[in-house]
Amino acid sequence: MSTTVEHSQHPPLIEQINTIRTRALIAGVVSLAVCGVALFADPRSFYESYLLGYIYWWQFAIGGLGLALLHQLVGGYWGVSVRPMLAAASSTILPLAVLAVPIYLGIGYIFPWANEEYIHSNHLLEQKQFFLNEPFFVMRAPIYFGIWLFLAFTLNTATKRQMRSTGLPNAEGLKFISGMGLLALFLSATFASFDWIMSLDPLWYSTIYGALVIVGGGVAMFALCAAVAALLPFQLKGKDVTIYSASRNTLGDLGTLLLAFIMLWTYFAFSQYIIIWNGNLPEEISWYLIRREHGWAIVSILLGLFHFVVPFFCLVSRSFKQTPKLLGGLAIGILVMRLVDVFWNIVPSLERSGFQIAWTDPFAVVGIGGLWMAAFLWKLPSFLTDDTLNAPRGLFDLTATEEEEHTHG
């Protein structure tokens, strides 16, 4: 049986993607509708929960775009397997631009600096008013999304053209754009994280915070890729029945990359903590003091254990990384911890009494997630060519899989 198969010959994959997409869209619409009830009863709760859900799913798009630019710049087999998902994730920037509108409609409910009395209560806040004011805050959004849309469109268009001509996802001639694009992405995503997250506590600041958020997006995207590659085998119906699944080498690559980004995220998080804690400045240290009280200390410990310690000791094992169920289960656990991390970063800075999960929080996360996932799965099939599926170290390396089954059979 030939290992090169056209899309029309393996409908189970496309059918499975379309089924998940439809379910995600329905779940998203229904959940957002339920969450929208809070607009009439408790608008502050709605907008705060919406911000939480938005930031969680925004990190996948930023992480996908950043990793796609990085692969375009440095090359390597590691990007062949994940490139379809990176391209699809970066293609969700436009839907995310539309989904960002409620954040700007609810500025007065979310951000304390939008209150004139709050600003004038502290002379340090008055000095920041040139940057933290509603007109300038709104004006910055089109700049951020304009940069991201340009990079995503340029990169994905060139990638599709390259795949059609050579079957390779690396488009020649884009290294300069990718290098400059990484710089532009880093700066714009840093300022976006300052706007949407750090300004929730306008007295606090950290120069490394943007890098921490961006690397967190890389962790989230690699965890998503590992979960899909490990847990989404599909059947190809034809003359024979073949199970497509990621090869052991592909799973090993994804596990190694996931470990590298988890270690980088931990390094940034620990560096930020040590620098601020040793500095012991009131406007800086208060951010961490809040997260040591009223139940937040337990969340901090859970983050340390399940966002670093457990994944580290699991992913250093080669056999663990190459076992689909083990890697897939860990990847899902990391995706959950990414949500916990976003929750830990945002909620303590809101006007809630201690550790508290609002009833609107899960509906906002599922609602925005359903719409994001529907957009992601809508674009994904266009990047799933035979070369990205079956190439060496591809997402589903059929040749390697058959050799492994024959060896271990």
Image: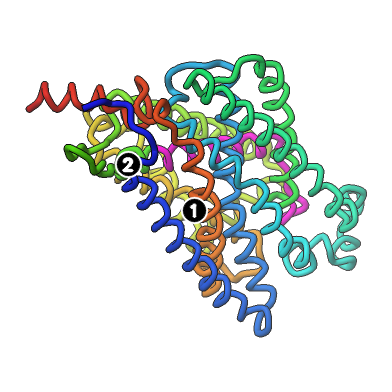
Disc 1 designates what residue?
339
Determine whether, in the image, residue 193 is placed left or right of residue 337.
right
Does the stretch in magenta take in 193?
no
Disc 2 designates what residue?
10
Q: Position of residue 57 (x, y in %)?
A: 56, 51
Determine whether, in the image, residue 298 is placed left or right of residue 276.
left
Q: Position of residue 287 (x, y in %)?
A: 65, 51
**How busy is the neighbourhood of tag 1: few (under 14 within 10 Å), some, or many (20 plus)?**
some
Q: Earlier in the sequence, mark 2 or mark 1?
A: 2
- Quadrant assignment for the N terminus: top left
Which residue type carries mark 1? Leu
Q: Quadrant of residue 22?
A: bottom left
Whether label 2 touches label 1, CB < 8 Å: no
Q: Nearer the viewer, residue 305 or 294?
A: 305
Which residue corresponds to the image point at 89% horizontal and 51% vertical from the top-left?
136
Q: Position of residue 254 (x, y in %)?
A: 38, 30
Whether 151 is drawn above or below 379: the answer is: above
Start and end of the magenta stretch? 199-225
- Rendered image: mark on residue 363: none
Element class at badge 2: loop
Q: Nearer the viewer, residue 289 or 141?
A: 141
Which residue corresponds to the image point at 51% horizontal and 56% vertical from the top-left?
374
Which residue type carries mark 2? His
Label 2 – label 1 distance at C-alpha: 34 Å
Q: Nearer the viewer, residue 284 or 150?
A: 150
Q: Main secondary structure of the magenta part?
A: helix
Say which of marks 2 and 1 sits in front.
2
